[in-house]
Amino acid sequence: MKDRQKKIRTRIWRDRQLYLFLILPVIYIIIFAYVPMSGLAMAFTDYSARKGIFGSEFVGLDNFKRFFESYQSVRIIFNTIILSVYAIVAGFPIPICFALILNSLRGEKFKKFAQSVVNLPHFISVTVMVGILFQLLNSRIGLYGMAVEALTGSYPPDLFASPSGFRHLYVWSGVWQEFGWGSVIYTAALSSVDPVYHEAAQIDGASRFQRIIHIDLPSILPTIVICLILRMGSVMSVGFEKVFLMQNGLNLSASNVISTYVYQIGLSATGNSDFSFATAIGMFNSVVNLIMIAITNKIAGKIGDTTLW
């Protein structure tokens, strides 16, 4: 036991500079990730600002019951799941396909140029992105409206006023903005593939497509599995900012998700904010995400050898 402790101390001293670099990130995580968890106690109380979190009346699971008994709960959960699953189905395979195609190109200069171009939308802020969508897809003065009016002689329907149109706009604008950035990790994984495999396959007469399917894709499969597990861990966490900016009274039936509902309850414009109720909904959201990541990780372990733990 003493020898083991001595080895640990020796290793820590040897790598002391690396441990020093960890101090600030660890402090940051403790302050902004772990300390705020104490506020989850608010979900089980009838919170009063005068009494504080731990001085407020304990109500148990009443706030959770209120949410599940609310007439809006089913619609809000349904909207959140639909948007998230739609985004995964539409957006998860595209970065993988793009990375495989990019890796198969021969011109290094063109590959770097293409990668730079598709990465640029990632750095556009959400507010600017939604502004671009409003300008381009405006049914009257936008490019979409003027093009349809020129071809048909009448103005098209407003896409932002349609609940189904909102879902498509939200998902596919996100795919366009993030697929280039999402392909970076797969491109990095593909760079570690030994060229000897491709040379051997070429000698055996394998086409480029066959080499992608039988060499490149299996090589990045562990990375794909890890990314999918992590993505499933946020299946209930639909981005608040973009949904909120695209939301209006006409598409509310499809755009009101858990994150925007928590905002409405917790920071009500009428002054009737219910912090306990909002905290309970947010806690429910986080618990579902935790369950999803655990289930996905378990399934991945049953099917293959790649898991998070």
Image (cartoon, helix red, strand yellow):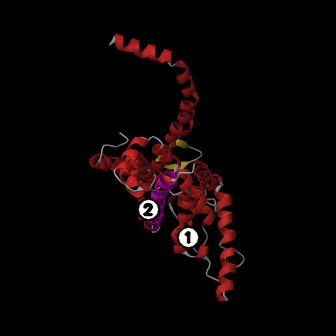
What residue is rendered at 41% in x and 16% in y? 8
Callout 1 secondary element:
helix
| Residue tagged 1 | 166
CA gap between label 1 and label 2 equals 17 Å
Q: From the viewer's side, name the closer residue of 41 and 221.
A: 221
Magenta portion: prevailing SS class: helix
The answer to whether 110 is drawn above or below residue 54 in the figure is below
The answer to whether 11 is drawn above or below residue 124 in the figure is above
Q: Which segment is the magenta one? A: 75-103
Q: Is residue 134 left or right of residue 264?
A: right
Q: Residue furthest left?
A: 302
Residue 47 coordinates in the image, percent (x, y): 53, 49
Q: Is residue 77 left or right of residue 302?
A: right
Residue 248 coordinates in the image, percent (x, y): 61, 70
Q: Count residues near mark 1 (Cα–Cα under 10 Å), then give few for <14, some for 14-19, many for 20+.
A: many
Q: Is residue 93 left or right of residue 18?
A: left
Amino acid type, residue under disc 2 in the picture: Val
Q: Quadrant of the C terminus?
A: top left
Q: From the viewer's side, name the closer residue of 263 and 223.
A: 223
Task: Kindly tell me whether residue 273 is visible in this rendering.
Answer: no
Q: Nearer the viewer, mark 1 or mark 2?
A: 2
Callout 2 secondary element:
helix
| Residue tagged 2 | 89
Q: Quadrant of the N terminus?
A: top left
Q: From the viewer's side, name the closer residue of 61 and 68.
A: 68
Residue 242 coordinates in the image, percent (x, y): 60, 60
Q: Count residues near mark 2 (Cα–Cα under 10 Å), then give few for <14, some for 14-19, many for 20+.
A: few
